[in-house]
Structures are given as structure tokens and as C-alpha cells.
Image: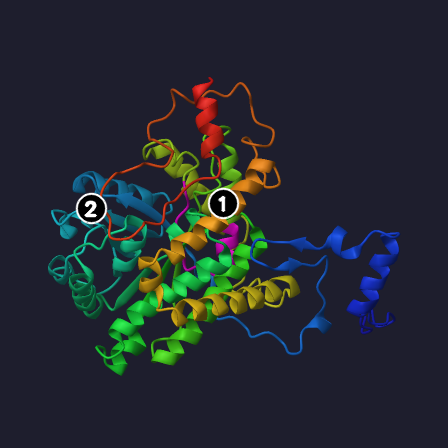
Amino acid sequence: MNKELFYDFSAVSSKQWKQKIQADLKGADYNDTLIWHTNEGIDVKPFYHADEFTMLPNISTTKAKRFKICQSIYVAQVEKSNTKALDAISRGAEQITFIIPSETVSIDDLIKNIDISLTPIVLKLLFLSSNYVSKISTQGNITIEIDSIGHLASSGNWYHNLNEDFKQIETIVKHSNTITVDTNAYQNAGATMVQQLAYALSHLNEYFNLLQDKLSQDQKSSLTVIFNLSVGTNYFFEIAKLRALRILYKTLASEYGFKTTCTINATPTKRNKNIYDYNTNLLRTTTECMSAILGGANTITNLAYDAIYHKDNEFGERIARNQLLVLKHESYFDAVNNPSDGAYYIESLTAQLSEKALDVFKDVEANGGFLSQLKSATIQKKIKESAQKEQAQFDKGALELLGTNSHPNKDDRMANELELYPFIKMNPVKTLIEPIIEKRLAETVEQYRLKTE
């Protein structure tokens, strides 16, 4: 059969589609009925068409087939953490992130018997010490993550002070050949996607400004920039968010002469998770991981369904890891490298998020830059405004969380299940700046239900 299909049908333009839809609405207003107005300032149309694009979109360089399943381990005891890592690897983990709380942790003992040629290791430091880092070999598959500006934004204080932190960051970057930008706090505190992208870029720009004249061109060209970010349940928007981040990063890196490809480590957000009807968290994290894969994340660390109220436990972590294993090996998410390329809706969202984030980035830079805006609490204020708007939508029921403000299980009891305090922790210490505070949408409702059980 040589005859091509559908050639007997004439092409239908977007104008013709819209006219047909308006006729079918029988007098109802097209914009009021079918246009979705989002918190990102993007109006979502009921359909997207090829004739809305003046040129073909660029082919992305993401390698979705290569995404790695990561297991995050907090190192309370070195020997137990090593054993836990080896067990996770045997059960399907493809990368291990060790969270290092202090300089007493021996890296050699921590990675004992782990074949780092097969399993990349990430050392995420919760302290700043260039002396400690200098003793760690970064040959092979060991990556060091430390973000002094991210620590300032989330805690309100530098590790030491501005000058000392930047001095040590410079030394660490030269040794590790990496810059880490941790943006998780922005999403978990309620920032819009446009804000998340813009602040991630402005956050990174502070490091670029610091290192611009202190690294050779060869060092810049080989430097790896790592973004740690959170992914929410707005499925297609989150796919577009990751794609937009790569576009924005390439634009900024090109201006400074840094390597134009970056690494994205994604994890599900905490903001929409709940303690009541907690199994619904499994549904959320699954779609969030799907968005991360299709958006082109390099590594994904899933969030256990009970992570906000239970201590680390084998069951929760195994289920979280298995979600990713099912997506990768049974759902064919590793079959195509760039599955979201060319989808009119996603391409449109990517372009709009990129443009809007670039505008916010330019505004931040025009008003002194990220650190200056943090010091004046401008960034914090804007994130609070976005968070309050989203919270109001949740409180009114316009934004639904299954099991919390939608179809709650009245018989569910959680007061005796809490191993961790799942709400905002107030720590009355003096800070240099106002910290960016993470808060879940369901906290107020859950606190009331706990009191009335």
C-alpha cells in the first residue's frame, strides 16, 4: 500500500478549529469557558496548533534514557550508611547521595566496597570546609555538592560570613570542578515556576560573578553546574520547567564562557504532601517523577510517601525506589531520549516560562542582584505573596489535595503515627537575613484535625 493516509483531507487551521469550538459552545464565552489562567501568568488554551509556530523548535540535547535512580542517605553513622548504600545498590539504586553532617565522617569508610566506576557517588555537605574537601578525591564518579548561597537563603545565615564563604567556595570549586545551586527551598516555600527559574538563574549568577576572573577558560569550559530542584504535580508545566531551565542556563553560561550544559537533580516537592490519607502521596510522587524524566532530569531522588512524618525506614524507601524502577523498566520511560520535543503544548509552555523567567531575572539583576534582593527581603516577600495566593486557593477548595480538602477520610487517625514534627519549626535564633521558610499547603488543616481527633 503506497498511498499515504489522510491526503484526501484538507488541512485545518487553528482559526478554523477555534470557529468550530465557538459554534459548539452555543453562545458560551470561549475565554471564560475554556481558557485556564495560571499562577505563572500563562493562559492555557484548549488546543495548540502547528501554525502558531513561525519555526520548528530546537531539538533538545537531553538524554531521558540515561536518567539515574538515586538513593539519598543521611550519614548518622558511617558503617550503617555504607551498609544501607550497598543494600540500595543491590536493589536497583544507580546513584547514591550521602548527606554529610560533619567533618568527622570518613569518606573512605563511607564508600567502602562500593564500585564507584558503576555507581556515581554524591557527597552533599551540610557544612563548609575547603580543608575537608581537599582531602576528597574527585577522580572518577565522586561529586561534591555545597551551596553557600542556598544555605544563606534557607537558614538566614552564611556558614561563616560572606568573604570567608566565598573564599572557601572558590577553593572548593577549583578542587571539585562543580558549582551546586540548590533551589528546593523556593518551590517548597510556594514560589511560582517563573520565580523558581528566575531565582535559580540569579542565584547561579552570583557564583559566576565570583568566579568569572578566577578561573581559566579551560576550567570554565569543563565546570559542571548542578541544579537541585523540586518538582510539583502540574504535570506538563513541570516538564516545561525543566526544559526552560536548560535553555536559560545555556543563555547565561554562554555570556560568561562557561560550559553550556548543566546537570539537573530532581526530587518531588514537599509542598503538596499530606499526613492524612498518606497513600495519595504515592500518586503525587509518581507523576512528579514522570515529569522529571520527561523534562530531562539527569538524576531523580524520589520522596518516600511517609517522609514528612516518619523517620527514614526500609519500607518507605523501598517503595520510593521501586516507583522509579517501574517507570524505568516496566513503563518504557527509558525508551526515548527526548519524548517531549515537538509537542505543541509543551513547546509553548517552555517558551513562555523561559521568557517570563528571563524578565524576572533581569529585574533582580537591575536591582542589585540576588544577594542584594535577599538582604532587602524582596525575594522573600515575592515568594510569600505567591505562597499566600496558592494557600488561599487551597483554603477555598479551588486547589485540591485528595485526602485533605477533597474527599478526606474522617476516620483517619494520625496523632500516634508521627515520628517527625511535620509542621513549620520555629527556631528563635538571630539571622543575618529573613530565611525562606518552607511550608506545606495542608499544615493548618492537619493541625486542626490532630487537635480534634
Circle number at residue 388: 1
Identified at 37% across, 38% down, the residue is 317
Residue at 38% in and 31% down: 309
Seen at 27% across and 77% down, the residue is: 212
Q: The N terminus lies in which quarter of the figure?
A: bottom right
Question: What span is in magenta?
Answer: 289-303
The crowding category of the residue bearing disc 2, from other C-alpha atoms within 10 Å (few below 14, some 14 to 19, many at least 20), is some
Residue 276 seen by the camera: yes
* Relative to 358, 26 lies left or right: right
- Pick whichever of labels 2 and 1 is earlier in the sequence: 2
Q: Residue furthest front?
A: 376
Q: Which residue is mark 2?
A: 101
Question: In the image, residue 91 lies at what x, y percent?
Answer: 36, 43
**Count of all numbered marks drawn on residues in the image:** 2
User: Of residues 316 and 192, which is closer to you in this image?
Assistant: 192
Q: Is residue 382 above or below residue 425?
A: below
Q: Is residue 329 visible?
A: no
In the image, is 380 to the left or to the right of 2?
A: left
Q: Give the amino acid type for the residue marked by disc 1 in the picture.
A: Gln
Q: Give the farthest residue toward the bottom.
A: 217
Q: Is residue 20 left or right of residue 227?
A: right
Q: Are marks 2 and 1 in contact (CB under 8 Å)?
A: no
